[in-house]
Image (cartoon, helix red, strand yellow):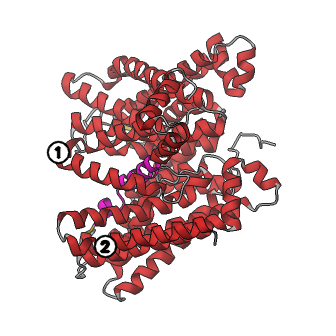
Amino acid sequence: MDIIIIGLLLGGTYALMAMGLQLQYGVARIMNLANGEILVCGAFGAIWFFTASKMSPIYALIFVVPIAFVVNWAIYQVMMLPLVKRAKNQGQLEVDSILATFGLSFIFIGILLAVFGGEFLTYSYLATPFLIFGEPYALNRIAAFLGSVALCAGLYVWLHWTRAGLTLRAIAVNPAAAGLVSINVPRASALAFALGGAVTAAGGVLLSMFLTFDASLGVIFTLKALVIVIMGGVSDVRGAILAAFILGLTETAVATLVDPGLTLAAAYVLFIAILLVRPEGLFGRRST
Amino acid sequence: MTGGEKRNLIISVLVFLVAALLPLVNNGYWLSIGVSVAMYTVLATSWTLFSGPTNYIALSTAAFFGIGMYIVAAFLDWAPYPVLVLIAGIVGALFAAVIGLATLRIAGVYFVIFTLGLAELVRQIVAWMQHVMGTSSGLYVLISMTDPILYWLLLGLSAIVFLVGWWIGRSRLGFALRIIGNDEVVAEHSGISTARAKVVLFIISSAFASLTGALVAPRWSYVEPTIAFSPFLSFQVVIMALLGGVHRLWGPLLGVIPFTLLWELISANFPAQTTLLLGVAFLLIVYFIPHGVIGLIEDMIRHRHGMLGSVVSTLQRWKSGNA
């Protein structure tokens, strides 16, 4: 019972981080290996904000999200656009963007090390028990879960009921065809990339409420987000949310039953299972 | 053997003989640099064997290197060192086979993603196993291995890597890989078993990384999960290979030598900023020298406008957005 509830709470928070990557990979077509580092930056921003002001980390979202948006927009314009333009095909772009963002991830780690040092950082916020079915759970996990659900719901509504959201979904289906119906594909892709980064950083803020961070943890979150996106299907929000819950549950089960140090192993087990059984993802369609 | 090949063979043998003389000339600073250069030459060249022709970027060097190192460190009391080195190579190959069979049958980025976290995954598993078995996380590798011997061993291993690479380049396997790199669908339709070719090459490339780890273990003398599986190594190897150029067998060598020297300089003068500077160097290479030093040299020969000229023209093309 413990495992199920903690797993669901964790999965809800992971869903937000996976939606960020999905915007970047599904819409802007950039395989961003620095995604986890952006999440860690968001978490460090929240930690710094909380220790400096003693206000709820939720308020940290107010400045972390816009900064992440601008930074990611700039990354797309300066670093990714030249790659998009010089790539002859999707495969070339994939190789180039993997290399570029891989380098970028080390730059982020370097900056974080220079500013915050190499120690584990955390803070104590809402570390009070909250009863669900008579069992106590940490209130900060529940707050992070609720925050994530609210942001995910907002993003879902925005994607499905606004014109801008429709534009992004059109590019996700087919960038070339989207260009033909007078969608400004480069601009919308930049928007998707920036928005994806902002959502990822928001995920970092929420995760920082109950997890301990250090500068080198990014790769673990990149991998988790990637596994969720692959499991859910690259362009399917429902799939990603379901996959996030599956990962949250598996990880909590492994951490409780085997060892808390093996969180990445849980992600890899799911990854291998997906690769062997349904490489196209839970809701994905087999390409012909 | 054609005349050109004979000439290349003679040149390579001479280069190796000259390189082998290094410990006789200098036994201190330059020899330790020589050991690093030899080690990265093995790692970067064997990385290129697989990732060069196929364009599948493997970020797993550190995982295999660490496995080799750990096998030596953990079983030193039970078996003689040379046997352990062999076992390290075999275990690395088997592990690579499992990963290759799971990820390389499917085209796409799955392989890259899988290798991205691999070092961290193996580190977690090793740390967990040590925890369960109640051993301490640090292990000592106490074998007397002098720098000259290590240098010659690594040099010998790099000679083997070059021979294997040369042989693959001439074989049907190498031909198949080049077609896969150009267009995987075409390769499949012309009857190439793409999955088998990729898996075989990945196994060869990874086994060399494990062998290197096993050879270098005595030099480190103290092995711990966080040190042995540091993701930096994968990163450095990819950088060096890209800097040199991945479309020629001896390309990575042209990246390994300048980068090892540069790296010595950076870690001596800016020990706190190594990660940041490494990232910056990596991006500069990806954006401005996409085909490596080799690409620059070939450009230079083709257009006869000097190395600076080809950097400038790359810059111009990048600025106008169609490099």
Chain where mark 2 sits: B
Q: Based on the displayed image, in which of its 4 quarters is residue A22 positioned?
A: top right
* Residue at the spot of label 2: B151
- Could you say which is closer to the camera, residue A65 or residue B24? B24
Q: In front of the other: label 1 or label 2?
A: 2
Q: Is residue B90 magenta?
A: no
Which residue is rendered at x = 22% and y = 45% of the image? A119
Q: Looking at the image, can residue A5 be seen?
A: no
Image spot of residue A246 (x, y percent): 57, 46
Which segment did they paint magenta?
Answer: B224-244
What secondary structure is the stretch in magenta mostly built from? helix
Above or below residue B299? Residue B139 is: below
Above or below residue B139? Residue B78 is: below
Image spot of residue B138 (x, y percent): 25, 69
Three-letter amino acid code at the position of disc 1: Asn
Three-letter amino acid code at the position of disc 2: Tyr
Measured in 3D between alpha carbons, the distance from the residue under mark 1 to the one under mark 2, in whole angstroms, is 26 Å
- Could you say which is closer to the camera, residue A260 or residue B26? B26
* Residue B269 tag number: 1
Classify mark 1: helix, strand or loop. helix
Q: Residues within 10 Å of mark 2 (few under 14, many from 20)?
A: many
Image spot of residue B321 (x, y percent): 55, 23
Q: Based on the displayed image, in which of its 4 quarters is residue A218 positioned?
A: top left
Q: Looking at the image, can residue A161 be seen?
A: yes
- Could you say which is closer to the camera, residue B52 or residue A61? B52
